[in-house]
Amino acid sequence: MASGSSSGDAGSGRFALKPWELHGEGREFEKISEDFGKAAAGLEQSLTALGSPWGLDRPGSGFAAVYQGARGGLLGGLRGLAGQLGQVGSGLHTMAERTVDAETTAAAGFGGGPGKGGPGGPAAGGNPGTPAATPGAPTTVPKDRSA
Protein backbone atom coordinates (compact mmCIF):
# COMPACT_ATOMS: atom_id res chain seq x y z
CA MET A 1 0.00 0.00 0.00
CA ALA A 2 1.99 2.99 1.21
CA SER A 3 5.53 2.76 2.35
CA GLY A 4 8.06 5.06 3.89
CA SER A 5 10.57 4.30 1.20
CA SER A 6 10.64 2.74 -2.22
CA SER A 7 14.17 1.40 -1.77
CA GLY A 8 14.00 0.13 1.78
CA ASP A 9 16.13 2.77 3.52
CA ALA A 10 13.94 3.53 6.52
CA GLY A 11 14.00 7.03 7.92
CA SER A 12 14.95 8.67 4.62
CA GLY A 13 11.84 10.85 4.67
CA ARG A 14 10.55 9.47 1.38
CA PHE A 15 7.00 8.24 1.06
CA ALA A 16 5.70 6.25 -1.90
CA LEU A 17 2.07 5.62 -2.73
CA LYS A 18 1.43 2.87 -5.22
CA PRO A 19 -2.06 3.30 -6.65
CA TRP A 20 -2.33 -0.29 -7.85
CA GLU A 21 -1.63 -1.47 -4.30
CA LEU A 22 -4.20 0.94 -2.88
CA HIS A 23 -6.77 -0.47 -5.31
CA GLY A 24 -5.81 -4.01 -4.27
CA GLU A 25 -6.20 -3.21 -0.58
CA GLY A 26 -9.49 -1.45 -1.34
CA ARG A 27 -10.79 -4.65 -2.92
CA GLU A 28 -9.64 -6.60 0.15
CA PHE A 29 -11.55 -4.30 2.49
CA GLU A 30 -14.64 -4.58 0.31
CA LYS A 31 -14.42 -8.38 0.45
CA ILE A 32 -13.88 -8.33 4.23
CA SER A 33 -16.90 -6.02 4.54
CA GLU A 34 -19.04 -8.41 2.51
CA ASP A 35 -17.87 -11.46 4.49
CA PHE A 36 -18.37 -9.66 7.79
CA GLY A 37 -21.86 -8.58 6.76
CA LYS A 38 -22.75 -12.17 5.86
CA ALA A 39 -21.42 -13.39 9.22
CA ALA A 40 -23.47 -10.75 11.07
CA ALA A 41 -26.60 -11.75 9.13
CA GLY A 42 -25.91 -15.42 9.93
CA LEU A 43 -25.58 -14.62 13.63
CA GLU A 44 -28.84 -12.69 13.56
CA GLN A 45 -30.63 -15.60 11.88
CA SER A 46 -29.20 -18.07 14.40
CA LEU A 47 -30.24 -15.93 17.36
CA THR A 48 -33.72 -15.49 15.90
CA ALA A 49 -34.01 -19.26 15.40
CA LEU A 50 -33.28 -19.78 19.11
CA GLY A 51 -36.44 -17.96 20.03
CA SER A 52 -36.77 -17.29 23.76
CA PRO A 53 -35.19 -20.30 25.51
CA TRP A 54 -34.80 -18.57 28.88
CA GLY A 55 -38.35 -19.11 30.08
CA LEU A 56 -41.00 -16.88 31.54
CA ASP A 57 -40.05 -17.18 35.22
CA ARG A 58 -38.55 -14.28 37.14
CA PRO A 59 -34.86 -14.96 36.26
CA GLY A 60 -35.80 -15.65 32.62
CA SER A 61 -37.83 -12.46 32.38
CA GLY A 62 -34.96 -10.42 33.86
CA PHE A 63 -32.52 -11.95 31.41
CA ALA A 64 -34.88 -11.32 28.48
CA ALA A 65 -35.22 -7.64 29.37
CA VAL A 66 -31.46 -7.10 29.28
CA TYR A 67 -30.80 -9.51 26.40
CA GLN A 68 -33.22 -7.95 23.91
CA GLY A 69 -31.65 -4.50 24.18
CA ALA A 70 -28.10 -5.84 24.11
CA ARG A 71 -28.90 -8.12 21.17
CA GLY A 72 -30.27 -5.23 19.11
CA GLY A 73 -27.28 -3.03 19.91
CA LEU A 74 -24.79 -5.80 19.11
CA LEU A 75 -26.38 -6.72 15.79
CA GLY A 76 -26.75 -3.06 14.79
CA GLY A 77 -23.09 -2.47 15.65
CA LEU A 78 -21.97 -5.46 13.61
CA ARG A 79 -23.95 -4.27 10.58
CA GLY A 80 -22.48 -0.80 11.02
CA LEU A 81 -18.96 -2.20 11.24
CA ALA A 82 -19.48 -4.12 7.99
CA GLY A 83 -20.52 -0.87 6.34
CA GLN A 84 -17.53 1.01 7.73
CA LEU A 85 -15.14 -1.64 6.40
CA GLY A 86 -16.69 -1.18 2.96
CA GLN A 87 -16.20 2.57 3.24
CA VAL A 88 -12.50 2.04 4.00
CA GLY A 89 -12.27 0.07 0.76
CA SER A 90 -14.02 2.85 -1.18
CA GLY A 91 -11.71 5.40 0.43
CA LEU A 92 -8.64 3.47 -0.67
CA HIS A 93 -9.92 3.46 -4.26
CA THR A 94 -10.50 7.22 -4.06
CA MET A 95 -7.00 7.72 -2.63
CA ALA A 96 -5.49 5.73 -5.51
CA GLU A 97 -7.37 7.75 -8.12
CA ARG A 98 -6.39 11.06 -6.51
CA THR A 99 -2.76 9.95 -6.30
CA VAL A 100 -2.70 9.25 -10.05
CA ASP A 101 -4.42 12.60 -10.74
CA ALA A 102 -1.96 14.50 -8.54
CA GLU A 103 1.03 12.80 -10.11
CA THR A 104 -0.24 13.50 -13.61
CA THR A 105 -0.89 17.15 -12.76
CA ALA A 106 2.54 17.54 -11.14
CA ALA A 107 4.27 15.98 -14.16
CA ALA A 108 2.39 18.29 -16.51
CA GLY A 109 3.47 21.26 -14.39
CA PHE A 110 7.09 20.35 -15.07
CA GLY A 111 6.41 20.23 -18.81
CA GLY A 112 6.52 16.48 -18.76
CA GLY A 113 4.01 13.77 -18.77
CA PRO A 114 3.54 10.55 -20.62
CA GLY A 115 5.60 10.53 -23.80
CA LYS A 116 6.99 14.04 -23.19
CA GLY A 117 10.06 13.42 -21.09
CA GLY A 118 8.35 13.74 -17.71
CA PRO A 119 7.85 10.98 -15.16
CA GLY A 120 6.80 7.92 -17.08
CA GLY A 121 7.99 9.34 -20.39
CA PRO A 122 10.93 8.02 -22.40
CA ALA A 123 13.42 10.58 -21.06
CA ALA A 124 12.76 9.29 -17.54
CA GLY A 125 13.35 5.72 -18.63
CA GLY A 126 9.66 4.85 -18.44
CA ASN A 127 7.27 3.45 -20.95
CA PRO A 128 6.03 6.00 -23.51
CA GLY A 129 2.38 6.83 -22.93
CA THR A 130 2.34 5.24 -19.47
CA PRO A 131 1.76 7.45 -16.40
CA ALA A 132 4.37 7.05 -13.68
CA ALA A 133 1.76 5.74 -11.24
CA THR A 134 1.41 2.49 -13.13
CA PRO A 135 3.31 -0.71 -12.32
CA GLY A 136 6.74 -0.84 -13.88
CA ALA A 137 7.06 2.91 -14.35
CA PRO A 138 10.04 4.61 -12.72
CA THR A 139 9.58 6.39 -9.43
CA THR A 140 11.59 9.46 -10.39
CA VAL A 141 11.05 13.02 -9.33
CA PRO A 142 11.48 15.73 -12.00
CA LYS A 143 14.65 17.77 -11.61
CA ASP A 144 14.34 21.14 -9.94
CA ARG A 145 14.19 23.77 -12.67
CA SER A 146 14.40 26.78 -10.39
CA ALA A 147 17.26 29.26 -10.91
Image (spheres, rainbow, N blue to C red):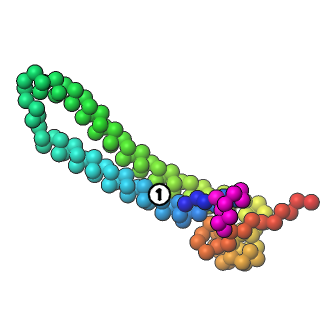
The one nearer the camera, 99 or 65, is 65
Q: Position of residue 61 (x, y in %)?
A: 13, 24
Q: For the C terminus, which image quadrant? A: bottom right
**Residue drawn at x 12%, y 43% as measured from the top left:** 49
Q: Which residue type carries mark 1?
A: Gly
Q: Is residue 141 above or below residue 86?
A: below
**Residue drawn at x 77%, y 66% as measured from the top left:** 142
Q: Position of residue 132 (x, y in %)?
A: 66, 69
Q: Please provide the residue range marked out in magenta.
A: 4-13
Which residue in the rendered view is the most extreme toward the right?
Answer: 147
Q: Is residue 53 left or right of residue 34?
A: left
Sort mark 1 into few (<14), some (14-19) or many (20+) by Cα contacts within 10 Å: many
Q: Is residue 137 above or below residue 45?
A: below
**Residue drawn at x 9%, y 35% as measured from the top left:** 53
* Element on which disc 1 rests: helix
Is residue 83 visible from the viewing direction of this image?
yes
Identify the residue under disc 1. 26
Q: In this view, does 66 lie above or below 120?
A: above
Magenta region includes residue 7: yes
Q: In this view, does 112 lie to the left or right of 17?
A: right
Q: In this view, does 45 lie to the left or right of 15?
A: left
Q: Where is residue 127 in the image (x, y as percent from the top left)?
A: 66, 78
Query: Magenta region, mostly helix, strand or loop?
Result: loop
**Residue drawn at x 69%, y 57% as measured from the top left:** 11
**Quadrant hosting residue 117:** bottom right
Q: For the N terminus, which image quadrant? A: bottom right
